[in-house]
Image (spheres, helix red, strand yellow):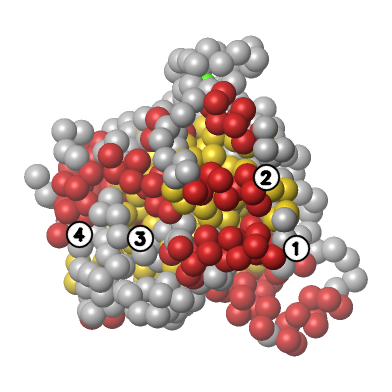
Amino acid sequence: MKKLLSTIVLTMSLSSTVCVTASAAELLIKLASPISTEKTVKTWNSAGLNTKQVMPQWISVQGNIQASQFQSFLANGSVLHVQPNYKLNVYSNPSLVKAKQNAALMKYIESLPIDVAAAKPADNPAIPDAPANTTGNDPLFSKQWGMVDNGLENALKINAGQKIIVAVIDTGVDYTHEDLLPNMWRNKNEIPNNGIDDDKNGFIDDVIGWDFLDNDNKPYDLASTNIGDLMNGANPGHGTHCAGNVGAKGGNGKGISGMNPNAQIMAMRFIGDKGGTTTGAIGAIRYAVDNGAKVLSNSWGSEGEDPAEAADNLALQEAIQYAMDKNVLFIAAAANSGNDNDGDPKKAAFPASYPHDNIISVAAIDSANGLASFSNYGAKSVDIGAPGVKIFSTTVGNHYSDTVIELLGANWDGTSMACPHVAGAAALYWSAHPEKNWKQVKDAILTSAKPIPSLTGKTLTGAKLSVENLMKVN
Ligand SMILES: [Ca+2]
Ligand SMILES: [Ca+2]
Ligand SMILES: [Ca+2]
Ligand SMILES: [Ca+2]
């Protein structure tokens, strides 16, 4: 942090006004002590800035900072830390990246006479009421090789999975999906659609979660089906796919099953087609923790774009610490650049590589027990492997798939897909052992994992998730 701070001070010494632009369009500032929102806003707004409280000691600041005023805050010790509002994103799907590198394929796509896609669905559909229970086998379960490989059916004989809240912090969730709707978390103390914050948690009509990107109560997973857009990084419905493996309703006669077939999915949206920011991530983490989530599924991060900065994202680290203090597990995708997260810090991925012990960092394996070629690894900082190649799950618009763009052979690949398997397994185990704390749940997951040669020396456990073994741990 010192480096960044000195950069800012240096800039200020060259000019009487620091225009907070480019890489630091918005700053996050840690104050020396928690102060009320009113006082914070008053103090900083009097300096001509737009401020907003992010955490008790943290505010975001936008605007032109007068050097003299800024320096006085630093000099009098009222400011402890200054950082940009770092960008964060879902990790690039390696399957799409590969397709994009295929020049012939791209040329063919560009030559197609029509827009090979349906229009985007409308954003923010109404949140349906919870449906009546249905029963029956999940007809597409056999396509979920990761669940089969994990021994989920045997695991569920030990405990069928109880209600427990898992926050899927991502691009949102298609909460109208037939196999997700029954397991959407419901905020019991919030009366829907009356324009009042009934439970006084600071969010109006937050029934199933919150959208921290658009600041609304409908964290809908606005997805693109346009091939060109998808090739350029548009959201294919990332959060909806993740949510299915965490907790699609099991035994309801429809679709698939999540690792915990009775999980309660809290939808937290902070990433869109253009990514997300640290303030959005912090908002989602704090909301989830404060509203009862026990497990946070995080298939996103900073993948070495500017690693010194990412490692220095103290604000994000403090939000993860807050989760730990409140007995919440933070499951993180290890990222998809094929790098050693223990090696060159410039290539490490965060938050997966932060030192906080409530993080479980997850690498991706394929159906032949191989470490996926794209998966990050790390003998110290990556804990475990889980299924992350050609993963079948729920997709936006009441669909199910293991391909993002079938025409291109682009599959749902990524540590993004591995992470929700672990988050869902944690939720299954914890729901059966509600007396345990996050550390006991993490230890159970790691000690029950199945060793596989491809992960030897590549992850802390050298092993892959086994939900069947996990459920045998007392
Ligand atoms: Ca509320
Ligand atoms: Ca309300
Ligand atoms: Ca929304
Ligand atoms: Ca189902």
Q: CA distance from mark 2 to mark 3?
A: 27 Å
Upstream in the sequence, badge 4 or badge 2? 2
Crowding at mark 1 (Cα within 10 Å: few <14, some 14-19, many 20+): few
Crowding at mark 4 (Cα within 10 Å: few <14, some 14-19, many 20+): many
Upstream in the sequence, badge 3 or badge 4? 3
Depth-wise, is mark 3 or mark 4 nearer the camera? 3
Depth-wise, is mark 4 or mark 2 nearer the camera? 2
Q: Eyeballing the image, is 357 above or below 42?
A: below
Q: Eyeballing the image, is 417 above or below 295?
A: below
Residues at discs 1 and 3 in contact (Cβ within 8 Å): no
Q: Residue at label 2? A: 62
Apparent side of residue 83 relative to residue 455 in the rendered image (left or right)? right
Residue at the spot 66% in from the left edge and 52% down from the top edge: 67
Crowding at mark 3 (Cα within 10 Å: few <14, some 14-19, many 20+): many
Could you tell me which secondary element the residue under label 1 belongs to? helix
Residues at discs 2 and 3 in contact (Cβ within 8 Å): no
- State whether label 1 is within 8 Å of ligand 3: no
Upstream in the sequence, badge 1 or badge 3? 1
The residue closer to the viewer here, 86 or 396, is 86
Q: Residue at label 3? A: 354
Q: Residue at label 1? A: 229
Could you tell me which secondary element the residue under label 4 belongs to? helix
Upstream in the sequence, badge 1 or badge 2? 2
Q: Position of residue 300 (x, y in %)?
A: 50, 58
